[in-house]
Amino acid sequence: MTALPKPQIPRIVELLRVSGQGQADRDTPADQRAALDWLRRAFPGDLVETIDCGAVRAVSGAADLNDRPDLRRLAELSRAKAYDELRVRHIDRLTRHTDPRERFAIFGMVHDAGAVIRDASGHVIDPASEIGEVDYFLQTLMASRERTRICERTLAARRRLSAEGVPQTKLGYGRRYDRKTRTWHVVEEEARIYRRLYADVLDGKSLPQIAAALDAEGVPPPRGGARWVPNSIREMIGAENAIGFHPSYDYKIPCPPITDAETQRKALAALRANATWSGPRKVKREALLRKLARCPECGSLMHVAGGGTQGKVFYACGSRRKPSGADGACRRYHRVEAVDAAVLAQLRRELRDPEKLARGLAKANTIPGPEGQEQVEEIRAELAALDAREEKLTRLATIGKMSEAIYESQAAEIAKLREGAESRLSIAQGRAEARERRAVKARDLMEALSDAARLIEGGTFAGWRRVVELLFSGEGARILIHEDGTVTLDGGVPVTQPASATGCS
């Protein structure tokens, strides 16, 4: 008698997952292991690996594939075709993601491995079958919807508790909250350190100095950190809970204050005034043509550069910063003070001449060719005539007064003429709309330029800068600073004359 072949023992990969410390505390991992152990006894197999990230950290079933080390390991085993069955206590241990693409990425892994999925009830999902695909979709969809409902219930509960005065967000430094008695407590040692932060800031100490001093004294930083961080100190100084209001899900819950609102306001003002947060701030040099002027040689933007200890400021071609920057004109430096003075003098002259402004605006807003709206009406009349011709042609063909060959020839000609007319109509409508937009822009610009003249006469840098941006930040506008210090203003509207400035190199 021929011996029957022995049944092949499947290679097994088991996956366990907990989504939070609460699950771990409720022995959910142990429950999962017990269920998988029962599966191994009921359906024997060769255990290849147990993927258990819960031993290291909790992993959310709603996390993306790239954020889940357990699934990245499963992907490696799938590429190696190292298993025949993927076993889980329940399908929601694999995924609860709301995006079906993320859910089916796992389905694809198992399919590529030529394996199946088996849960603790013994139910099998075979990715190679159509019913398996539908089964997987429905089960993971239900899992994702259940997670959505859990999140909604959790959010509603947290908002309700916040409304009742029970904090649901991280507590402020120096305070504790007893959820059983619903009472606040002050941790006096931490509160003393917190008050010291305000005193140090008001004394003029910088945040890095305060942090270094606390570290040197061995004061434990907030929330178990390794050291005190200036950014964290600044957040503590401005925190609402410091003055007795703990924010929690759009509610402000009264809590024991560390300081009063006036002290907090003074401390924040001291931070801004003394730049104690990030150290001394760089003073931005005033330059009228910053990020507007260009080098005429290479087209690069002109940068604003300091001139050493004397405090002089220069315009210089940005290509000088590049290893392959050009030589010659691109290496010239031009005094900001001289260039800006020459540009302002020219702008004053231009803005005082209303007729020149009007001519410049008219030129800039002229669209060559026929008037847009008139051309639109002409083409619409042409299309109406083609419609009438086609209607007559159809009527003649219907009553048998025109042969089919002539009808088709005439209809093709009308269709060709209509296509050309519709194309021209689209262009004409675009021109008409552009003309209208430019007319509106011209009116707005004239009003703005009236204000611009007043701003320039006012003599403030902010006003001058607004005028230059108005004139030269649009498409086609240019400001060029030449090698000899000459400045060419070409904004189209309305300044077209060159201004000169003495260049320094």
Image: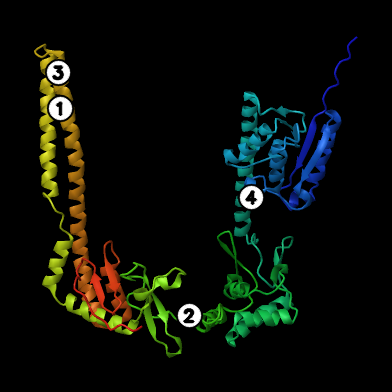
Amino acid under label 4?
A: Thr
Q: CA distance from mark 3 to mark 1?
A: 11 Å
The first of marks 2 and 4 along the sequence is: 4
Residue that label 2 marks = 282
Q: CA distance from mark 2 to mark 4?
A: 47 Å
Residue that label 1 marks = 414
Give the secondary structure at mark 3: helix
> How many numbered marks are there?
4
173 sits left or right of 296 in the view:
right
Of discs 3 and 4, which sits in the foreground?
3
The N terminus sits in image quarter = top right
Q: Is 490 located above or below residue 8 in the figure?
A: below
The first of marks 3 and 1 along the sequence is: 3
Q: Nearer the viewer, residue 176 or 206?
A: 206
Amino acid under label 3?
A: Tyr
Q: CA distance from mark 3 to mark 4?
A: 73 Å
Q: Nearer the viewer, residue 118 or 46?
A: 46
x, y (%) of residue 475? 28, 61
Give the secondary structure at mark 4: helix
18 sits left or right of 294 in the view:
right
Query: Marks 3 and 2: in contact by CB < 8 Å?
Result: no
Give the secondary structure at mark 2: loop
Query: Marks 4 and 2: in contact by CB < 8 Å?
Result: no
The first of marks 2 and 3 along the sequence is: 2
x, y (%) of residue 467? 27, 73
Q: CA distance from mark 1 to mark 4?
A: 68 Å
Residue that label 4 marks = 154
Q: Which residue is drawn at the image coordinates 84% and 29% (left, top)? A: 42
Residue that label 3 marks = 407
State which quadrant residue 284 falls in.
bottom left
Q: CA distance from mark 1 to mark 2?
A: 71 Å
Q: Which residue is drawn at the image coordinates 18% and 24% (left, top)? A: 412
